Amino acid sequence: MPENTEVLLDDFENTARWTLAGPGAGRTHLTTFAEGAPDKRPVDYADGTRGADRRALVLLVRDAENDLEIELEARPDPAFAPSGEVSAVGVYVRSPHAQIRVSADLVTADGARCEVPLGRVPASGEWQRIGHEPVQPLAGAEVRALRVRLVEVVPRAGEVMILLDDLTARTAG
């Protein structure tokens, strides 16, 4: 079957779709930013329309420290679940104030849970595309959470800002 890339949900950047959890939740504010990652190519949304949004989801972390972990738990209705088998998951990330590690918690159609590493991002003002390709495609995979771990915080006054844009999945079927 041919593979295609689709945005899991066109309102990924909607703060109402997420709940903050984990040790860093109390220090984190979730908002959006009017500028998304540049140089994105239009992709198919889950409903089949083409486009590229222009907003990013933003985590603002107070009193940030190395190894602090923040989880973005997806609210269940509707789920971040593309149709078909998922052969890759990716997201654009920009983290000017901390080196971070990002992973996604997935649940497959048979109820198996797995955490997939999406990548490590250096402290930089540049957008980076990170992602993961499982060894075997995952049937009916649903993204339940994104986990961000601050690996190394750049010493500075104020909040650490982390921007996330266009959570995507490559699917077949």
Image (cartoon, grey):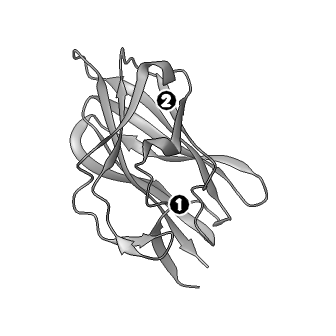
The quarter in which the N terminus is drawn is bottom right
**Going by the image, does 6 lie left or right of 171?**
left
The quarter in which the C terminus is drawn is bottom right
Return the mark for residue 133: 1
Sequence-wise, which precedes: disc 2 or disc 1? 2
The residue drawn where x is 55% and y is 71% is 171
Residue 24 at least partly seen: no
Occupied quadrant, residue 122 = top left
Residue on which the image places disc 2: 70
Residue 12 at least partly seen: yes
Badge 2 marks a residue whose secondary structure is: strand
The residue drawn where x is 24% and y is 34% is 96
Q: Amino acid at mark 1?
A: Glu
Q: Amino acid at mark 2?
A: Ile
Residue 115 position (above or below residue 50): above
Occupied quadrant, residue 131 = bottom left
Decide: few, some or many residues near mark 2? Use Cα within 10 Å; few <14, some 14-19, many ≥20: many
Decide: few, some or many residues near mark 1? Use Cα within 10 Å; few <14, some 14-19, many ≥20: some
Q: Residue 87's spot in the image, x, y percent?
A: 56, 67
Residue 116 versus residue 49: which sits nearer the camera? 49
Which circle, 2 or 1, is nearer the viewer? 2
